[in-house]
Amino acid sequence: MNFDFSDEQKALKDEARKFLAAKCPPDRVRKLMEEGSSGHDADLWAAIIEQGWTGAAIPEEHGGLGLGYLELCCIAEELGRAVAPTPFASSVYFFAESVLLAGSDAQKAAYLPKIVTGEIIGTQGSSEKVGPVTAESIDAEVSGGKLSGVKVPVMDGMIATHAVVLAKEGGKPGLFIVDLSADGVSREQLRMMDASRGAAKVSFSNVPAERLGEAGEGITLFDAVNDRAAVLMAFEQVGGADMCLEMGREYALNRFAFGRPIGGYQAIKHKLADMYCKNTLARGNAYYGAWALNTNASELPIAAAGARVSASDAYWNAAKENVQVHGGMGFTWEVDCHLHYRRSQQIGLVAGSARVWKEKLVSRIERRNAA
């Protein structure tokens, strides 16, 4: 079985890499962080929409390209390499996937074309406190079609126009679409370690909410959406990890100490070799997840958790070791190592930390083996 991308998909990756190298160089990301904005490059986002990437996995009948999830994984990897400061993940991996998975025909027709054109920037509001999101951790409530409660942090919450919110209705969790421009919605920008991705505390007070799926299915749908997003985020992490390895290798070959490149010293060789091994393992798990996602295989829950755990470990390891390879300079603002260091920390917590996904992986394997 061949888990590699096709020639056409590799060509898409190459074009995406060239596009992002031109439109999203590190100095552009750095400038956005220095400005202290909400972590959103509006011009880059408009260019990405023009490329049609937001509709890569959305069916043509809803204005998308209808390519598939493998192509979306290719795009995700390149966005991760570039540390792209856009709401792509929030809007495409979480909001669009929620509508695709649980939306009615009318909801799909209403929301998906606007995701493709960028008229809607979507996000997901699930967590309210420290710890995993469970039915017991949810206090937000929908009564009479109106939502009240608080979600924090909400990724890209300052710029999103709509959110899929996890809330209780009649005591049971459900997923609801909320227009964030409605009366009763207030937002507070949060200060994040990764300033290239913004987040907000979003409060709701009797805000109209439109249910996705059936009543009481919230946790089941929430987990299913997060499994899909986990695979796509794993590709972003793999892309970032590979970029860290390339940065470290390039520096090791060109930085001289005691008359020789530092890459010739065993300590540096071992760091780079360990980065390569973890990155390769993560890529293999990500490819397995991509196959399961693209074919809607029954293995998706296990494959998604495995991809997420492996990619989180690889990206964090590559980011911190890249700093170490760069030595004292690696800790400074002038060197780009910190861009990936910050992103590896931030993305490693979206939709659950590595610890949460490890617990999911173990429990899912146990259930499969007991069946």
Image: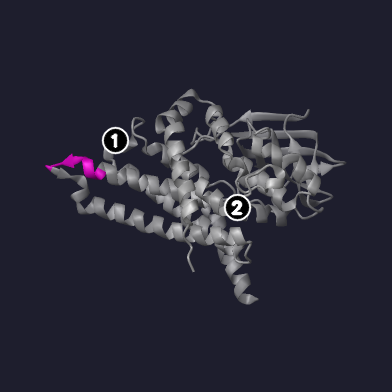
Report the residue marked by disc 2.
68
Residue pictured at 48% horizontal, 27% vertical: 32
User: From this viewpoint, is residue 334 visible?
Assistant: yes
Residue pictured at 58% horizontal, 62% vertical: 292
On whether residue 218 falls in the magenta region, the answer is no
Query: Where is residue 110 drawn, in percent x and y?
Result: 77, 40
Circle number at residue 203:
none
Circle number at residue 329:
1
Residue pictured at 48% horizontal, 57% vertical: 5
Query: Where is residue 333 drawn, in percent x and y?
Result: 36, 31
Mark 1 closeness class: few <14, some 14–19, many ≥20 residues within 10 Å: some
Query: Where is residue 144 drawn, in percent x and y?
Result: 88, 41
The correct choice, above or below, for 310 with respect to 75 in the image is below
Mark 2 closeness class: few <14, some 14–19, many ≥20 residues within 10 Å: some
Residue pictured at 49% horizontal, 42% vertical: 79
Cβ atoms under marks 1 and 2 closer than 8 Å: no
- Quarter of the image that includes the C terminus: bottom right
Mark 1 or 2, closer to the camera: 2
Pick whichever of labels 1 and 2 is earlier in the sequence.
Answer: 2
The correct choice, above or below, for 111 with respect to 1 in the image is above
Numbered disc 1: secondary structure: helix
Range of magenta residues: 252-259
Identify the amino acid type marked 1: Met
**Residue that lies at the very extreme toward the top in this rendered image:** 35
Identify the amino acid type marked 2: Gly
